[in-house]
Amino acid sequence: MVFSSLVFLYIFLPFVLIGLSICRKTNYQNAFLFLASVLFYSWGGPKFAIVFLCSILLNWFLGIAIEKWENQKKSILAASIILNLSILILYKYTNFFIDNWNAFVSIFNCNPITIEKIALPIGISFYTFQGVSYVIDVYRKTVPAQRNLITLGAYISLFPQLIAGPIIRYNEIQSQFTERKFSFDNIYKGIKRFLLGLARKVFIANQLAIIADAIFARSPETLSPLAAWIGILCYTLQIYYDFAGYSDMAIGLGKMFGFTFPENFNFPYISKSIKEFWRRWHITLSSWFKDYLYIPLGGNRCSKRRLYFNLYVVFFCTGFWHGASWNFIVWGLLHGTFLVIERSGFGEKLEKLFPFLQHLYTLLIVIIAWVFFRAENLELALQYICSMFIPHTNTTNSFLYEFATAYNYLIGIIAIVCATPFIAKVNDWFKLKSQSNLCLQITRNAAIIIFMIVIMILTTNHLINGGYNPFIYFRF
């Protein structure tokens, strides 16, 4: 089940809101959310729910074991990390390792390993990381072990963030499982945030995806530099609005239920360095790797050589976390390389340049890196990058004319403008002014309500007519 579906919007979500309004006590609400989340997850494949429930049971038991057997807690922590990562590796990376092994042994004419392809449970990267962070926090005594299996199950399975994040740590919302406010005001605020994300996904990301997919579907040698750049620019905006839209919807749903989730994006494309980009892009993942991998490795309180090693390890893992493919590894290492370059002194020189040049440098690296993220394999990625900079013979731009519509131009302009803080600043200005101006306050509130109604009508029409495009991060 996806958020941008008629079943979710008109059946499942109202069912959950009604159920929560009936379950007045927080413990009952936790139990109801746990059951609703299991139903939500099982909708796409009941067999994967068994893996997900086993993960919850495993981390619940190990958290209690760490607290109970203090003398053996290091061994229990090690077992917890190994078991959690083993589940992730089994389902997400087994096919990758076998394919690479078979490619290697084929050089020596050896028999390949033949097994049935292992299907990837949706959201496994996200709920595995949440389970690992919970057990580590219990080990560090940041939080006490949760004795109530239903409560811990509700935390790990909470369906707004279950499939594609944000990655929420138990210590961030621990108190909200014992005391939170389920109110009309929170529902209203949550619906506003949810519909903002829905609009980003359905009307911007999906439209840009049509152009990006059409261009990436062509052989790179047939693409002119103009076509190649249009394709990757559309994908650059698509992946932002797709993922940020999902995060908005998750945060909005959490607010409806009385939870406050951490923000996951902060206008990453206005960054002036790769370092700043990772402070603004997928913030919860960056924070997770910083606290549970980078700092334990030594962070930046070590020699430069060790610092660079730590950065490469973190961004190798960041890339590999995104997918079992060499493309994702190269994508992560590319970002890691430029972070190392910035740490080695280039960052200080970069700060002295005009802001425009800082933005240009950052966007160029990010956009080129997205080619590896989007292309099917490394060979196609490298060929595509060549097409961006080197004109080929026998290329044509004629196929681009089908996308040269007023609607696409409008979507492109909106996407670029909304990727900056401009609209947010205008909204903050109106909000501030409306506090002392009743007429302006009524106008602003009316505009918000009209926006919400229009989004629901247009989205419903879009879904009825068969428009569908799954979230990019569902793959991870």
Image: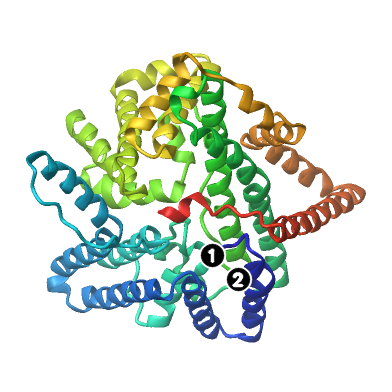
Name the spot of residue 290 as percent of width and height, x first: 33, 46
Residue nearest the observer in this picture, 373 or 340: 373
Q: Is residue 90 left or right of residue 72?
A: right
Alpha carbons under labels 2 and 1: distance apart: 10 Å
Indicate the secondary structure of the residue bearing disc 2. loop
Q: Position of residue 255 (x, y in %)?
A: 61, 64
Horizontal side, residue 239 vs residue 255: left or right: left
Q: Residue at x 39, y 15 (%)?
A: 349
463 or 148: which is nearer to us? Answer: 463
Query: Any mark on residue 160, and which?
Result: 1
Q: Amino acid at mark 2?
A: Phe
Residue 392 in picture, x, y percent from top left:
46, 15
Q: Are marks 2 and 1 in contact (CB under 8 Å)?
A: yes
With respect to residue 242, does 340 lie above or below? Answer: above
Tell me the quadrant of the picture where the N terminus can be found: bottom right
**Residue 287 image position (x, y, % from top left):** 39, 48
Can you tell which mark lies on residue 257?
A: 2
